[in-house]
Amino acid sequence: MPIKQTLHKGHVPVHIYTDDIEHEALQQLLNIAQLPIVHPHVAAMPDVHAGIGATVGSVIPTRSAIIPAAVGVDIGCGMNAVRTTLTASQLPDNLARVRSAIEATVPVGFDQHEWNKVRGSQHARVGRPLNDRLDRIVEKHGGIMKMQQKFAQTWICQIGTLGGGNHFIELCIDEEERVWVMLHSGSRGIGNVIGRYFIAAARKDMERHRMHLPDKDLAYFSEGSTLFDDYVEAVDWAQDYAMINRREMMRLVLGALEKHLPPFKLDGEAINCHHNYVSRETHGNERLFITRKGAISAKEGELGIIPGSMGARSYIVRGKGNPDSFCSCSHGAGRRMSRTEAKRRFSRIDLEQQTRGIECRKDGGVIDEIPGAYKNIDEVMAHQTDLVEVVHTLRQVICVKG
């Protein structure tokens, strides 16, 4: 479908690819559109919903400036998916052992790899190229180290770990009964620390320059300033870390599956993409900084991943390169309600019913991730036919949550 509505109440218009959007998200989009650095318009994806400062599911183009809070604190959060040569018929009838094997291999929630086991291992070598770059960042901004205990060890121990919240590892089946492995995670604790540090720095910088903002969380760094350069260096580092984290996690998951499933190979389609990030891009012959906060790149022919909730379908898509969306599409279903509201409204019985047939946690600790807390992924997909085409439709059979 084309753009559903356009708002003209800010410095630039806001193009919205859905009519399912709450008032708070609309106001956040209008706040963003008032900023003088935003150009030529803001695009809101079909999964749009309220975030902190900037709206989740928004694509924000800026001239010579970046808004740290729009990138957020889960810098580089995104998806990784691979197709295997396995078929559904080769999976065991009882998938509990497979889920347990994944959970025993990949730390989830607040857990991480033990330092004594990863020090000097292949695991540590994966992160070695990042080490010198991080040292340069911390040398200029020692406050980052102060915000994370056992700083030097933690970021290495969290490579190849899932985290909590909406992060997940899944086994899925496509329309040809082929098995896919799909996972969702980002830059873990170190990305959170970097994000919070520079969001606070941007606020202080705006206060020092007496800049009036519609929301303090929309504070930005201007190109040419030292803080801008330092933030770009730090956010590039965190985005690279997130990519490596997903790659290492996928390696660990595939290793666990090899011990419990028939022999298999990977089958050519592998995707590793961010959906919380900033990049330098050219649109309309103009160089811009494009911040995708809960959106993925959908350039013409580019493959991407749009996951549903725990009990819904997910999609492998191919971008159409739509210029109105800055070659972007949604990053998932999008939340329909807050985590607090989901816990208030739903019970463990509801969770069991909505995830029937899926091997996953069904306890009170993941009620906030219940499918009913999210928008209908099929409706979201119907609103972005101008942005992507569906290549594969996946249904989950195993879902590991933090």
Image (cartoon, rainbow, N blue to C red):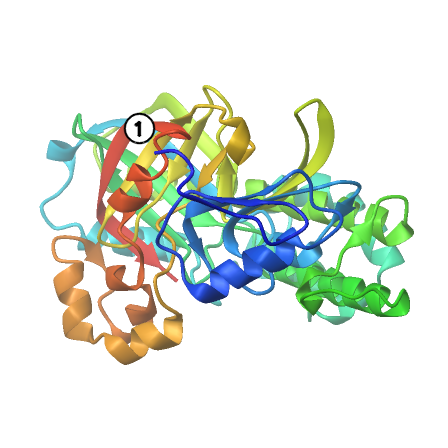
- Whole-percent x and y of residue 284? 66, 24
- Answer above or below: position of 322 versus 335: above
* Residue 116 seen by the camera: no
Q: Label 1 neighbourhood size at 10 Å, few (<14), some (14-19), many (20+)?
A: some
Q: For residue 200, what is the image quadrant? A: bottom right
Q: Residue 327 placed where, x, y %?
A: 52, 30
Q: Is residue 340 left or right of residue 262?
A: right
Please report the residue visible at 31 percent of the width from the left and 28 percent of the height from the top: 390
Q: What is the secondary structure assignment of the residue under circle 1?
A: strand
Q: Residue at x 69, y 60 (%)?
A: 218
Left or right? Give the position of 131 relative to 14: right
Judging depth in this view, the residue of 188 and 279 nearest the camera is 279
On the image, numbered disc 1 is attached to which residue? 390
Query: Quadrant of residue 27 in the image?
Result: bottom right
Where does residue 279 sit, x and y in percent of width and height? 66, 37
| Quarter holding residue 342 | bottom left
> Does residue 382 sit above or below 302 in this rendering?
below
Instruction: Spot the residue most to the bottom.
Output: 344
